[in-house]
Image: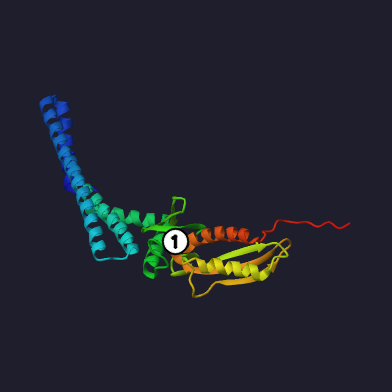
Amino acid sequence: MITLLQAEEVVEKTTGVIKAVSDGNFDTLLNKLISLGVDAGKSILLAIVIYIAGRFIINLINRLVRQMLERKNVDATIQSFLKSFASILLNLLLVISVVSALGINTTSFAALLASFGVAAGMALSGNLQNLAGGLIILLFKPFKVGDVIEAQGVLGSVKEIQIIHTILQTPDNKEIFLPNGSLSSGNITNYSKMDTRRVDFTVSVEYGTDVEKVMNALRGIANADSRVLKDPEAFIALSGLADSSVNFTFRVWVKGSDYWPVYFELNKQIYEEFNRQGIGFPFPQLQIHQ
């Protein structure tokens, strides 16, 4: 807010202007206006210089912080959070500096800002929950930058963990912003947490097909792919007799990074191998008895 001394100066200059007008002294009026304009121009010019210099310094500090964190090999999740927090704090300090240069009392401004913060905190309680959620994620690390997770009905790779939101990049290259509050309190499936994953297939063949022939074909497919782990070994079993098909469960273990390549490639190999060996695939059938 404007200090008492500043208020007195403004009143004094304004009174002088009014007096000059009433006395018809236009030279005095012009001098008063010039004086007011110069004072205001100085404050505005100083505020502009501080803003430009402040933006340059903030960018420099952000760059130095990023380089320091990378040089110290700080976890990418913590890096993202700290950079976001530092940027917000520095910009807040810049706003206070610009306001001070405009002649506003920063003490009163800080009190006003604190009051506004309390009111905003009550209105934005959800964002405070998201802030707390971000701290929980940072502390307990249910996931980190680069992990593939599924949460809130969204599947994607963690691109960035900010103070309020976590950014996911979906397989079709969309960015999804998820609030940290719901992430920290909801269910999260982390597909990157473990080194290995199991690939499950349900393979259906027509009735009358030799069971051992099917199992040997599937075992041969698993053994021929070097990405399929030998321990634990592939699991093959007849799992169901459906209306129009005999169903086999086929499970193999792979490294997490090989999950989707193996899934698609083995589907292709099953189709080609079964055709080569004459193993028929089923189709819906309906028998009518008269």
| Circle 1: residue type | Val
Q: Is residue 226 visible?
A: yes
Q: Is residue 25 visible?
A: no
Q: Residues within 10 Å of mark 1 (few under 14, many from 20)?
A: many
Residue 215 placement, left or right of 184: right
Horizontal and vertical percent position of residue 245: 70, 62
Q: Nearer the viewer, residue 27 or 187?
A: 187
Q: For residue 30, which quarter of the picture?
A: top left
Q: Residue at x 29, y 65 (%)?
A: 74
Residue 214 placement, left or right of 145: right
Where 16 falls versus 66 (above or below)? Answer: above
Where 137 falls versus 268 (above or below)? Answer: below
Q: Nearer the viewer, residue 66 or 231?
A: 231
Q: How many marks?
A: 1
Horizontal and vertical percent position of residue 205: 67, 62
Q: For residue 162, which quarter of the picture?
A: bottom left
How is the rendered protein coloured?
rainbow
Horizontal and vertical percent position of residue 58: 22, 52
Toward the right, the furthest residue is 290
Read off the residue under disc 1.
Answer: 148
Horizontal and vertical percent position of residue 48: 20, 42
Q: For residue 268, which quarter of the picture?
A: bottom right
Q: Residue at x 63, y 62 (%)?
A: 277
Quadrant for the C terminus, please: bottom right
The secondary structure type at the circle numbered 1 is strand
Q: Nearer the viewer, residue 87 or 129?
A: 87
